[in-house]
Amino acid sequence: MKTQRAKKKENKLKKLIGKLHLWFGLLIGSIVLFISLTGALYVFKDEIEGLERNKYLYHNEPNIESKEKLKLKVLEKLVNEQVKEEYPIHWVNIPIDRSMTYQFYWYEHDPKGWNYFKEYPVYKSAYVNPYNGKVLKVYDEKNAFFNIVKSLHWGFLLNSEWGKWLTGIPVTIFVFMLISGIILWWPKNKAARKQRFWFKWKNIKNWKRKNYDLHNVLGFYSSIFSLIFAVTGLFYAFFIVQAMIYVVFSGGNTTYPDFSHITTTAPLEMRNDTTLDKVAAKVEELNPDAYAFSVDLGHEHMDDHEHPNFSIYVRQLSYSYHKNSNLIFDENSGELLHVRNHEDKDFGEKVVNANYDLHVGSILGLPTKIIAFIVSLMCASLPVTGFLIWWGRRKKKKTQTK
């Protein structure tokens, strides 16, 4: 049995936690509401865009069994002639399914731009028939609804380096609030436990009690998933979170696998207009069951940084990014130098690779996306119900002092 002294200490600690939970809630409540709602909006991006773009995902070219795709450099030239964009094409997504279109991307990042629209001078995609080079559709990805929602969610449309602090700090506080909320929710006895797990409103008419129950019950059921979404969001804001996640799930490894020593050794003279086609053919040969892969076309860009080697990212699944492979090629000869498949990676790498899918709920496809959507709405409700609890108590105190 607990002594009176221990109970007093426990009550004092709970009161302090309660006050911090309240003050932090009032401080960041509106930000949590905004981040949660924009997160909920973003969850079904792929499904909604897929419906809208479905007719351009497939080229409907007849008799493709007897036809050959155009060379990548030929396709690049044809796309440039049709789109007439001032910036060079950055990369191309190549699906393994021969009936699908190629997607060419223009993407430039200017770190000096103070807001989202200045930071990305161009972000476009073109859906292209790889058999004749015809551009079926061009999308302005920068001004697309879901990418604006993403930037709002990430940093209120500000430069990503600044914006991550404006969301990262409140989300860090939100993590504390989730943990403190569980401590405050934890029932003292069996009678209290019955009330905490579900709504007991049969004889309850008071809206304050119903609102209190909503805050407690929804907060409890959403807490585990909310913690996952919050921590995976902080992964993008703070490098220390990335490092901690890898160290924990890799079993204590403090050095992330590095393959920068595997580099191009063949002379530049060996590179020609068919080098990328040789690379693409090898990727398709080794990954016949994959969804798609990306090939950088090798041009200079605004924020160009040193690439230690020519790496190809292979996406194995259509609905998720966590299962992927990385192939390193000699940029000049097109020879394969290294393969790192999903199965070769340690658990820490797999968790890092799964971070985006965990954050948006796509890790297991539609079922986990539905969970992510519902939990995001629950998170959005918590600042509202929490504020109403505080407001109701505040009014009650004012009434009692009159």
Image (tube, rainbow, N blue to C red):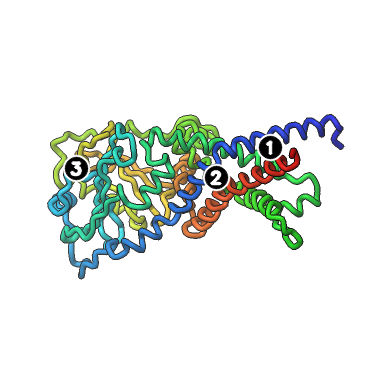
Q: Closer to us: mark 1 or mark 2?
A: 1
Do the residues under discs 2 and 3 have CB atoms within 8 angstroms? no
Please provide percent x and percent y for residue 97. 30, 61
Q: Which residue is mark 1?
A: 18
Q: Residues within 10 Å of mark 3 (few under 14, many from 20)?
A: some
Which numbered disc covers residue 228?
Answer: 2
Foreground of the two, 279 or 26: 26
Q: CA distance from mark 2 to mark 3?
A: 38 Å
Displayed quadrant of residue 99: bottom left
For the C terminus, which image quadrant? top right
Which numbered disc covers residue 87?
Answer: 3
- The mark that comes first in sequence, 2 or 3, is 3
- Let me know if residue 233 appears in the view: yes
Instruction: Tell me which amino acid carries mark 3.
Output: Tyr
Which residue is at a point 28% across and 32% down the rendered structure image? 305
Element on which disc 1 rests: helix
For the N terminus, which image quadrant? top right
Please provide percent x and percent y for residue 277. 20, 50
- The mark that comes first in sequence, 1 or 3, is 1
Element on which disc 3 rests: loop
Instruction: Tell me which amino acid carries mark 1.
Output: Gly
Please provide percent x and percent y for residue 200. 73, 58
Q: CA distance from mark 1 to mark 2?
A: 23 Å
Rendered position, 276 above or below 304: below
Q: Closer to us: mark 2 or mark 3?
A: 3
- Let me know if residue 281 appears in the view: no
Do the residues under discs 1 and 2 have CB atoms within 8 angstroms? no
* Apparent side of residue 261 relative to residue 41 in the rendered image (left or right): left
Instruction: Tell me which amino acid carries mark 2.
Output: Ile
Which residue is at a point 20% across and 39% down the rendered structure image? 299
* Apparent side of residue 221 relative to residue 58 in the rendered image (left or right): right
